[in-house]
Image (cartoon, rainbow, N blue to C red):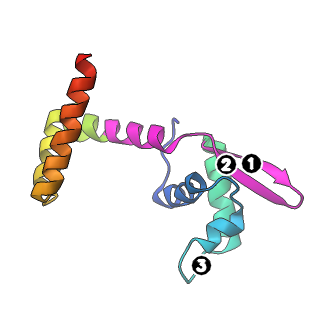
Amino acid sequence: MKVKLSRREEEVMEVIWSGKNVYAKDIIDSYDDPKPANTTISTLLKRMYDKGYIDFEQMGNSRRYYALVKKEDYFSKEVKGIISNFFNNSATQFASFFAKSNNMSVEELENLRDLIDNEIDRKKK
């Protein structure tokens, strides 16, 4: 995972991550009208293959695509990059910004606090 995915490639990856047997037609069908052209999706898939994010199995005249990178691993790396680049490598600064800037409800903040408390308890063990 050296080269970041573009926004369009991330959209395609979401479809691949959500299914086990994903063909180009499935990706195209996941879009609202007007749907992207076959060539557009083929180009995106080729780029993603070249970047090492996906692979495929040849199934007759079609290719069945699958992810080589887990969704959690990809987004974990992206979030770490954001924290490093924009928050001086401080998860605390990131969490503070996130909590303040997203107009979170009291319930959402309490849920976030519970998640943090559980993680603290897990690390203490």
Q: Position of residue 9 (x, y in %)?
A: 54, 56
First along the sequence among labels 3 and 1: 3
Work out whether residue 88 can be spotted.
no
Q: Quadrant of residue 91?
A: top left
Disc 3 target residue: 35
Q: Nearer the viewer, mark 3 or mark 2?
A: 2
Specify whether 64 is left or right of 119. Answer: right
- Helix, strand or loop at disc 2? strand
68 is higher (above) or lower (below) than 35: above
Dot 3 alpha-carbon crowd within 10 angstroms: few under 14, some 14 to 19, many 20 or more: few
Residue at left offset 89%, top offset 58%? 60
Range drawn in magenta? 53-81
The amino acid pointed to by label 3 is: Lys
Residue 121 numbered tag? none
60 is higher (above) or lower (below) than 74: below
Q: State how far apart marks 3 and 1 are (Cα).
A: 22 Å
Q: Position of residue 1 (x, y in %)?
A: 53, 36
Q: Is residue 103 magenta?
A: no
Q: Quadrant of the C terminus?
A: top left
Disc 2 target residue: 66
Proximity of marks 3 and 1: CB atoms separated by less than 8 Å: no
The amino acid pointed to by label 2 is: Tyr
Disc 1 target residue: 56
Q: State how far apart marks 3 and 2 are (Cα).
A: 21 Å
Proximity of marks 2 and 1: CB atoms separated by less than 8 Å: yes
Of all residues shown, which one is farthest toward the right? 60
- Toward the viewer: 124 or 23? 124
- Helix, strand or loop at disc 3? loop
First along the sequence among labels 3 and 2: 3
Residue at left offset 68%, top offset 58%? 22
First along the sequence among labels 2 and 1: 1
Q: Position of residue 54 (x, y in %)?
A: 64, 45
